[in-house]
Image (cartoon, rainbow, N blue to C red):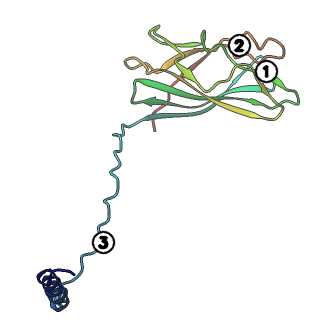
Amino acid sequence: MPNKKIVGYILLLVLFAACAPGPREDPELVAPSPVRPSPPQVVTPPTYPTVIYRFAREYPTNRRDVVFLVDRVEILPNDRMRWYVGFFNRSNSNYRVGFDTGRSYLTDEAGNAYPLLDSSYVTNESLRAGVRRDYWLELPAPRGQADEFTVRLFSDSSAVFSAVTVPTFELTLPEAD
């Protein structure tokens, strides 16, 4: 038989718990709004002005109906310049296009050389009849006030048969945009 004192204490606790007031509802208290995480902070790198020279010039190639194009030159903030160039095949024949990115370069009026650092060119590409193919070429930024360039794009040695070659040509940067 359980101890009467223990049973009494248990009954007293049950009675106390049953009679204890519940949580009060105060009409002036408003439930807090759910906590929303703050949006992630996006760190935007600083932007520097890019100088853009627009051309839309055509230069002849060794194929009568295929031209080499220079659309624009951008002077980038990372001490590089990017040339946007392309080939346009106006003929009814397919040709191989390209240049040797390891040997091609520019020189300025002071004789400074600018080697190709990077490009979107893929070796020995086919240029179908009536198609234009665009590329970019990245070189060191012009030194000083250089604005006249001699462009030397050597043919890709793997594109010997039906290859389009670009003769050396001169280009002067116009006024920037």
Secondary structure of residue under mark 3? loop
Few, some or many residues within 10 Å of mark 3 (<14, 14–19, 20+): few
Residue denoted by label 3? 34
Residue 133: % across, % down: 71, 32
Kindly identify the residue that appears in the image at 73 percent across and 16 percent down: 165
Residue type at tag 2:
Asp
Mark toward the start of the polypeptide (3 vs 1): 3
Q: Nearer the viewer, mark 3 or mark 1?
A: 3
Residue 119: % across, % down: 58, 24
Residue denoted by label 2? 156
Q: Quadrant of residue 17?
A: bottom left
Q: Nearer the viewer, mark 3 or mark 2?
A: 3
Mark toward the start of the polypeptide (3 vs 2): 3
Residue denoted by label 1? 96
Q: Are marks 3 and 1 in contact (CB under 8 Å)?
A: no
Q: Are marks 2 and 1 in contact (CB under 8 Å)?
A: yes
